[in-house]
Image: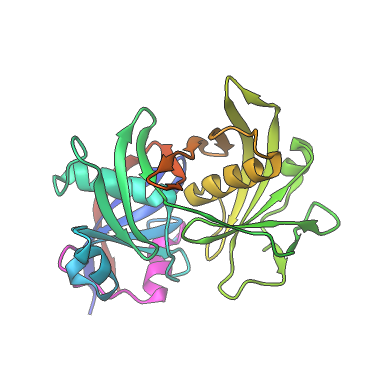
Amino acid sequence: MPQTLAFTKGHGTGNDFVILPDPDGRLDLTDDQVAALCDRRFGIGGDGILRVVRAIAIDEGAGAAASAAEWFMDYRNADGSKAEMCGNGIRVFARYLADVGWATLDGAPLAIGTRAGVKTLTRSELGFEVDLGPWRVDEADVLVRARGIGAPRPGLGIDVGNPHVVVALPDTDELDGLDLTAVPQLSPEPPHGANIEFVVPSEPLVQDGVGSIRMRVFERGVGETLSCGTGVAAAALAVRHWAGPAAPDRWTVSVAGGALGVRMPEVGDERHVLLSGPATLVYSGEITLA
């Protein structure tokens, strides 16, 4: 039986999403239905789906509900696969909650449940800032093969709640020459795949205490996107790691869809990575699914 869904289209620096309000957890979309909604020719079009559901209404939200997070971000990639976290998506998710009056961000930080745990958001000069929490560097050898860069290049594993492999390139010509219509190959291949970021440091790397890099990204389950929030954080963390102990804790990362800010403050007794940037709601409507 056909099903009519209300939706809102939103994006964060060009990383775009179909937002589906489902507070009571009644929607049960198949992978094919998610892919149909995200299809840019026959559907609404998007890099993924953000289902807005109360944490108590989804099995995966039990931990979030116990931590007093009312809302859970059920994020699905454009191919229908589930993802742990989305840095641009969670800012768009928070913007949606605020705009429809389901949450406020004018006082205490807003807690949102994800498959990577509870994340908190606040308003910032760039729009919204999300605390992605601690990160983990995996220095195990991994080689990345990508069309347009010749020989395989070493990559650095960075986990910010979801897995990333970051590859340093020598100049912008090589970055621009990448052909990311072909899936980059990782050796060894992580068991659950990874997002892959290709980065070039700016010249100079640091100005006024802020580091600057440029990035392109291939997102697992999606392909090349104009931006990837967790990928931006991973790229800044990787370059900071390579640069050594004197590297700054604040970064600006330029992507095809704009620029995002990253900082790494001390939170309690550990260092966290925070991502800030805009979140835009474009239009709302209804669509009927077969």
Q: Is 59 placed above or below 257 here?
A: below
State the extent of the magenta-drawn residues as a range.
23-41
Would you say 102 lies left or right of 259 here? left
The residue shown at (46%, 56%) is 47
The percent coordinates of residue 43 (x first, y second) are: 39, 61
* Furthest residue toward top: 208
Q: Nearer the viewer, residue 267 or 233?
A: 267
Q: Is residue 62 at all visible to an observer of this figure?
A: yes
Q: Which of 85 and 35 is in front in this view?
A: 85
The residue shown at (47%, 43%) is 14
The percent coordinates of residue 157 (x first, y second) are: 63, 59
Q: What is the quadrant of residue 54 in the picture?
A: bottom left
The residue shown at (31%, 48%) is 120
Would you say 271 lies left or right of 112 here? right
Q: What is the quadrant of residue 12 in the picture?
A: top left
Q: How was the colour assigned to the protein in this rendering?
A: rainbow
The residue shown at (79%, 40%) is 170
The percent coordinates of residue 158 (x first, y second) are: 59, 56
Residue 182 falls inside the magenta stretch: no
